[in-house]
Every structure is written in C-alpha cells, then in structure tokens.
Amino acid sequence: MGIVAMLVAVVGSSTVSQSSDELATLSAAGRSAGGLWELALNIDGHFLPYYGFMHLWLEFGQAQWWLRLPSAIATGVATALIADLGRRLHSLPAGLAAAAVYVFVPSVSYHGQNIRSYAFAAAATVLAIWALHRAAEEPERPGGWWKYAAAVALLGCTQVFALLVLAAHLLAVALYDRGLLRRMLPSMALGCLPGAVWVVIGFNERHAISWITLPGPDVFLALPKMVGGTSLAGCVLLVLALAALFLWRRLRADRLWMTALAGWAALPPLLLFTLSHLVSPIYVDRYLFATVPAYALLAGIALASVPHVLTALTLTGFLAAGLPGQLDLRGEDGHHENFPRAVRVITGEARPGDAIMYGRSSLREGFRYYGGASLPDDVLLLSGDPLPESFGYPERTDVAAAVGGVDRVWVIWRGGPEAGSRVDKVITLVGEGFVRDRAWRTGRVPGMTVALYTRRT
C-alpha cells in the first residue's frame, strides 16, 4: 500500500505549478549552508530541519517531479505505517481499509505533491503512535521507549504544530493506564526537547505569520474540507470516523487506543484555536494535516467491521467522492497559483527591449524557475542571490530611472487587475506616463495579475 500511495502522489506532480510556499522551500534549500543558517535566524527557523534535508536533495536535481518526490515518499511511508497500525489496533482488514482510505483522500495527494514538510509531519505522527503502541504492548522488545522518544523527536522536527497530537497520547494513557503513563512520560519529555527548540525559534519569528487573523468558531466548519481535500470527501470520512467512535464496543476496539485516535483527530484543532486566542493567531488549516491519518484509521476500523461487499462499495463510493478533487489538484493551477501560464503570457507577447518588474520581489522566484532567461530584462534586480534575511531579492528603488528609455514594462502583482492601483511600482510607472495596455489574471483567488504597461506617446 505504501508504494501505491507514493505512486498516486507522484502522478501529475510534474505538471502542477508550484505555490509561493513551495517556492519558498526552493529559495531556502537552494542557498549555501551558511546562507540557509542566516535565513533561519530571521524567518522560518523552525523549518530548518526540512530545509536542510531539501538542501541536500537539491544537489541531485531541481526538476519539479524530483522536488516533490520526498513528500510522495513520506506519504508512502505514512500509508504503510497506517496499514500496520490498523492491524495492531484492530485487524488486518482494518489496516488495509485505513490505508486505502488514506490513499484515496485528495488532501493526502495534495500534500504528497507539496514541496513542504506537511507530508513528513503526517508520517511522523503515525510513527509516534505506532512506536507508542509497540512499546506499550510489547514490553519485552528492547529499546521500545527509546524508539518512541526518537519518533517524538522526529515529529517535532517536521512541523512544530504537529506536536499537538501528543496531547492525544497523554489523554488516552492518563485516562486508562496510569502505569503506562509513568513509563511514557520520560520518553515523551526527552523526545520533545528538539521540538521545544523549534517552538521557541518559531515564537521569536512569529512576525513571519503576522498575516494570520484571529480565528472564529466558523473555522471548525471548514474541517471536513481540510481533512478530505474536498467538502464531500471530508464529510464521508468524518461520518466513517464517527461511526467507529460511536460503535467502538461493537467493533471490539480497545478503548485506550480508540480514545487516542479520537484525540489525535479532535485535539489539535481545538488546541490550535485556543492558542490563537491566548497567545497569537496561528490557526491555519494546513497546520492540521497531521490529523488526517487518525480519520483514516477510524474509518478503516469501521469498514473492517461490516461485510466485505459493503466495505468494497463504501471504498468505491469514497473514491468517487474524492475523484473530482484528485483531478482538480493535478491541474496546472491545482496548488492555487499558476506561474507557468504567467510566464507563457509574457514570453508569448514580449518584444525586444521590454522590461519586467514585480510588485513583491519574492514573486521573482517563480518566474526565475519557470521562465529563466526567456523573460524580459529585470531592470530592478541588483543581485541574482536572494536577500539573506528573507525570500525577496535586492532591488533598485529608483523605478523611474530604471525604466528610462523603456517603452513597454511588464508588471506582476498579487490579486486581480484592480489591485494594481495599490502597487507602488505601478503608481510610479503611471506617474512616468505609462498606461495599462492589457492585463491577464492567472491562478485562483486571489491569484496573480500579469499586466503590460506602455509609455504614452
């Protein structure tokens, strides 16, 4: 099942435009070791383990499918662990059904193609509870608690918010096995040390997520879509998970581990919401992707307890429910942005002597990756190396002087064409006698606008 999941994630991964977050990974990982360290001292320091891994990965290539392959492999590992954990917690059919559900979920394919650490975080959460179960149920195996500590340490190094799933471990064990709690706590505490470092670093660099707004209760209504990738797939998955929880006695499931699965699914969003109100706004749907394996495991346990024919029909229906989402995320704008189309617009219409500039200098990363030398003259760029403390690039500030002698300028900004009136560089161009000739919108809302400005004659 792990290989199947990896292959499903790989399919279409070379055709989907990278998002800005993915390009941030490319920018960070493409720096020297010293440059990556300097970046981490200013922004995204808690992603340093992942960026460090991708720094090494980029040594072997920068093709899009290659950049996305680590997340696909992590998805395969998560699926294999889900299959074995489902077998351990209930039965072999439960493990296989849970793994199949996980493969079919559109959100899993999305993050399996995402050049970010979320697929790694999901795999690490499964590994952590898998290691906990082995340590608890097979005490004769040597090093069980050391392995659990290592799994928790890995979890904290993938994505700091994934550590919230440990609350489920604590809740379940504290409720039903105090002796196990005494054995678990030292290993958990030891494993949390690396994560604690990344949490402190992330808190000190919280300016990087200042764009996050304070969440209202309505964010919980969006959980099905976050879990499933589409609202329909998420609702089906949620119904199956709830069925397992309500019928756990009839399903002959252990209450400790069912509580752990329920807490794994429910506690992280509640804790993230609470922390957003008590400390700082941090609630973003994708930060909760590590909860999806819990839903798949609960669904697998529910499906293993019904006749095989009904299981097969349910899985087929679930696949059908998620298929539109699976196809949608493999479109060129499946990750919401469409840098290749923007590049095609410019290269198809550009003339010799044209210039190009970016409303935000970090947009340049995508155009450099997809367009390279085929783009017009980047008249504001001072250096081909990104700024050491951010994902932007050093630029000239004298826009008027930079376009002196240029009659056509391409400008790219976030949002629709109407947002151009608020872009400083556009305001300067208009002041210098340029008028908008044409504009193209690419990607999904809010999207990105490519506009051609010509000098008024």
Image (cartoon, grey):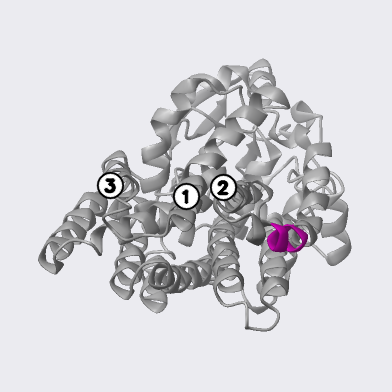
**At which x and y percent is residue 134?**
56, 73
Q: Is mark 3 in CB contact (under 8 Å) with mark 2? A: no
Q: Nearer the viewer, residue 446 or 43?
A: 43
Which residue is label 3 attached to?
243
**At which x and y percent is residue 277?**
65, 23
Residue 187 painted magenta: yes
Q: Which residues are magenta?
A: 182-188
Residue 373 relative to residue 114: left or right = right
Q: Earlier in the sequence, mark 1 or mark 3?
A: 3
Give the residue type at disc 1.
Thr
Q: Residue at horizontal 70%, vertical 24%?
A: 278
Which residue is label 2 attached to?
175
Q: Residue at horizontal 29%, vertical 66%?
A: 97
Q: CA distance from mark 1 to mark 3?
A: 14 Å
Dot 1: within a 10 Å radius of its alpha carbon, few (fewer than 14), some, or many (20 or more) residues?
many
Q: Nearer the viewer, residue 126 or 329?
A: 126
Q: CA distance from mark 3 to mark 2?
A: 22 Å
Mark yes or no: residue 284 visible. Answer: yes
Q: Is mark 2 in CB contact (under 8 Å) with mark 1? A: yes
